[in-house]
Amino acid sequence: MSWMMRFVLAMYVVSGGVLWLAGTLCSQEAPNAATQASSQQLPGEESPADPPTTVFPHSETSRLWVSGQMNFIEQWHPSFHSPYQGPLSLTPQGEHALSRVFTLFTGVELTGYAEALFQLESAGGKGIGNGFGLAGFTNLDVVHNPSLGSKPYVGRTMLHFAIPLSHDRTLAQRNPLSVFRELPARRLEIRLGKFQLVDFFDLNSAGSDSHLQFLNLTVDNNGAYDYAADTRGYTVGAMLDFEDHNWGIRFAEALMPRQANFIDLEWNLSRARSENIEFELRNGLLPHRNGVVRLMSYINHANMGDYRVAIQQFESGETAVPDVTNHPFRTTTKYGFGGNLEQSLSGWLTAFGRFGWNEGRQESFAYTEVNQAVTFGIAANGKKWRRGLDRAGAAFSSNALSGDHRLYLALGGKGFLLGDGHLNYGRENIFEMFYTIHVWRGVYGAFDLQHINNPGYNRDRGPVLVPAVRLHLDL
């Protein structure tokens, strides 16, 4: 092991020890919180014994909602084996990078069944390799276009309606995506405006929150779900969501970007659009334990290139290298499927998994360059060791490309994230582990470690070790 690798591992251990000590000294949780927790509780759920989870108190009765978040992530990696690199390769020399995201959430309950939400956001800093070179990138907060800068922009902006279909009510946990205090148990929800599709699709209580849980793109989301979004992850659309006691089904029509990983959306629906549908069954596979199964599908229509056509153009001498963007405007179709499972194993431990597949001939366009994804892992809250708001987890993610996509990259083609100039193909395999410490009220610290084999699907490069520390504030 090189001295640099030893240094990075030592820093990781020291950072973890410092954060653990800070949490032990500052967090004042009830000593019997673990014994009071229900065996049905999933990670991230709070019990009445939990201390405040925001820096400032928030009213549970006011029609208005104002809150904020701040998220800082410092990642680094030592130098790794790389006999060659291309224009979009992960930098093989040792480096570090700091990203930050600030968000202001506001909302107002217009009536008992209508609300308006508005958010401002600023995303700054950068990721290792400027956000390129990995399909399963190590930091979900990174915007893969550094030229956008950190100027504040409008994030989620939507109207939300709930149409009651039953008389019985259920208590609702207020949050930045809904400030309703209660909802009909059976209802139809309508959302119109600007949002992220993964705010509502492919959610998982054990692995969807990059601010308190895992950091990797293909652990927090289904890597093969090329969901409609601009560079910052947002789209404009309409969503219908039918919810019953133990199941739900949702459908969304959303705008696609004008070109791959582009900030501007295409407003002409005859040129580009995305249909998304998901069925959710809230029923555990184990008796007397909570669980959820989700099945999802999507169809994207956009000005996407064709990897096979780009390869043919290169082989016939029309282009110097394969170029999937070398085509006149045309609307092509890409579709995919996904499965999502979470299963409570005890009051403090949950297993989760995802599987995804998409048609791999049309170009990867919005999320990342993955045509098949498999993820599984475990997540825990700290109730077992009397630190109820701590979180921990470990996960394995394996990503793959279609035959057309891998040949395109092997011949020197570039995607919007990948391009080593050559490719000795292998599945991109990622292992991630984290521990998040509740320090005080809405202050959380975390340390994270990721190990990546075949970065960018290239057996000739890597492996890469990426430690990280994170500071998160819920205001």
Image (cartoon, grey):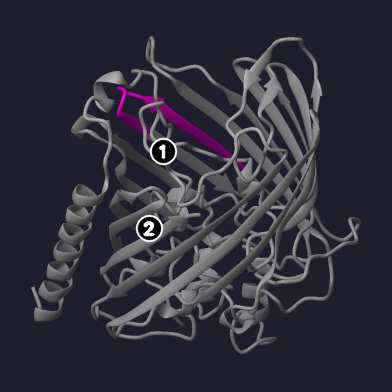
Front label number (2 vs 1): 1
Give the image quarter of residue 331.
bottom right
Q: Residue at x 45, y 54 (%)?
A: 210
Residue 230 appears in the picture as rendered = yes
Question: In the rendering, at what x and y percent does residue 120 appear?
Answer: 67, 63
Residue at left 63%, top 60%? 233
What's the magenta region?
A: 337-351
- The residue under label 2 is 427
In this rendering, position of residue 427 left or right of residue 256? left
In this image, 421 relative to 35: left or right?
right
Q: What percent of the width, then of the height, locates residue 183? A: 70, 23
Question: For residue 394: magenta?
Answer: no
Vertical comparison of 282 with 193: above or below: above
Q: Provide the secondary structure element on which disc 2 rests.
A: loop
Q: Amino acid type of disc 1?
A: Ala
Q: In the image, is 350 to the left or to the right of 144?
A: left
Q: Is residue 89 at least partly visible in the picture? A: no
Residue at 62% from the left image edge and 74% from the top image edge: 311
Residue situated in front as seen by the camera: 284 or 446: 446
Q: Which residue, given by chain and number where applicable, does mark 1 sit on?
A: 206
**Residue 347 forms part of the magenta stretch:** yes
Q: Quadrant of the N terminus?
A: bottom left
Secondary element under disc 1, as helix, strand or loop, is: loop
Spatial CA distance of label 2 from label 1 is: 24 Å
Relative to 472, say whether 128 is above or below.
below
Provide the major secondary structure of the magenta segment.
Answer: strand
Label 1 neighbour load within 10 Å: few <14, some 14-19, many 20+: many
Image location (x, y in percent) of residue 20? 19, 53
- Indicate which disc residue 25 carries: none
